[in-house]
């Protein structure tokens, strides 16, 4: 069953975040990941959405998504993202 990593992001260091964005795609490919949403305009229709940027990644399974997030390949980019932005991240099973 597909799984989706949904991330709300507020970039605090645009230059470092640009480096992060360039580093991530090769880390998701080995896990079957692909971008569904990568930023773009958004409007909050209901409730609170604390960060102005949203990213959604699709993986073949919850296990693949978690393996990517915990991978050595993503370790460096993850640390860079954490220093260049604040974020909320979840993984959820799809249909």
Image (cartoon, rainbow, N blue to C red):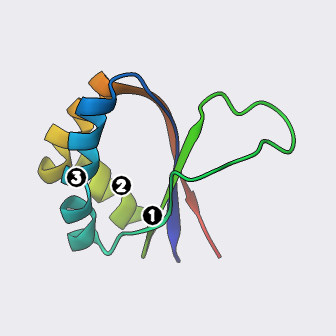
Q: Is residue 94 left or right of residue 2?
A: right
Instruction: Pick the residue in front: 86 or 93.
Output: 86
Which residue is under mark 1?
A: 62
Q: Residue at x 31, y 49 (%)?
A: 69
The x and y percentages for residue 66 are 36, 55
Q: Are marks 1 and 3 in contact (CB under 8 Å)?
A: no
Q: Is residue 11 left or right of residue 80?
A: right
10 Å neighbourhood of mark 1: few (<14), some, or many (≥20)?
some
Disc assigned to residue 22: 3
- The C terminus: image quadrant: bottom right
Q: Along the polypeptide, which appears first: circle 1 or circle 3?
A: 3
**Front label number (1 vs 3):** 3
Q: Residue at x 78, y 41 (%)?
A: 44
Instruction: Pick the residue in front: 2 or 39.
Output: 39
10 Å neighbourhood of mark 3: few (<14), some, or many (≥20)?
few
Q: Along the polypeptide, which appears first: circle 3 or circle 2?
A: 3
Q: Residue at x 51, y 66 (%)?
A: 3
Rounded to the nearest angstrom, the CA distance separating label 1 from label 3 is 24 Å
Say above or below: 36 vs 15.
below
10 Å neighbourhood of mark 2: few (<14), some, or many (≥20)?
some
Rounded to the nearest angstrom, the CA distance separating label 1 from label 2 is 6 Å
Disc assigned to residue 18: none
The x and y percentages for residue 38 are 47, 57
Rounded to the nearest angstrom, the CA distance separating label 3 from label 2 is 21 Å
User: Helix or strand or loop: what does disc 3 sit on?
Assistant: helix
Disc assigned to residue 66: 2
User: Helix or strand or loop: what does disc 2 sit on?
Assistant: helix
Q: Is residue 60 left or right of residue 15?
A: right
The x and y percentages for residue 78 are 26, 38
Say above or below: 76 vs 48.
below
Q: Are marks 1 and 2 in contact (CB under 8 Å)?
A: yes
User: Helix or strand or loop: what does disc 1 sit on?
Assistant: helix
């Amino acid at each position: 069953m597909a799984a989706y990593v949904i991330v709300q992001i507020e970039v605090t260091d645009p230059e470092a975040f640009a480096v992060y964005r360039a580093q991530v795609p090769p880390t998701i490919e080995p896990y079957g990941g692909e971008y569904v949403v990568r930023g773009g305009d958004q409007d909050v229709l209901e409730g609170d959405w604390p960060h102005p940027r949203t990213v959604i990644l699709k993986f073949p399974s919850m296990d693949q998504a978690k393996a990517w997030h915990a991978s050595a390949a993503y370790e460096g980019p993850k640390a860079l993202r954490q220093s260049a932005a604040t974020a909320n991240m979840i993984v959820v099973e799809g249909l």
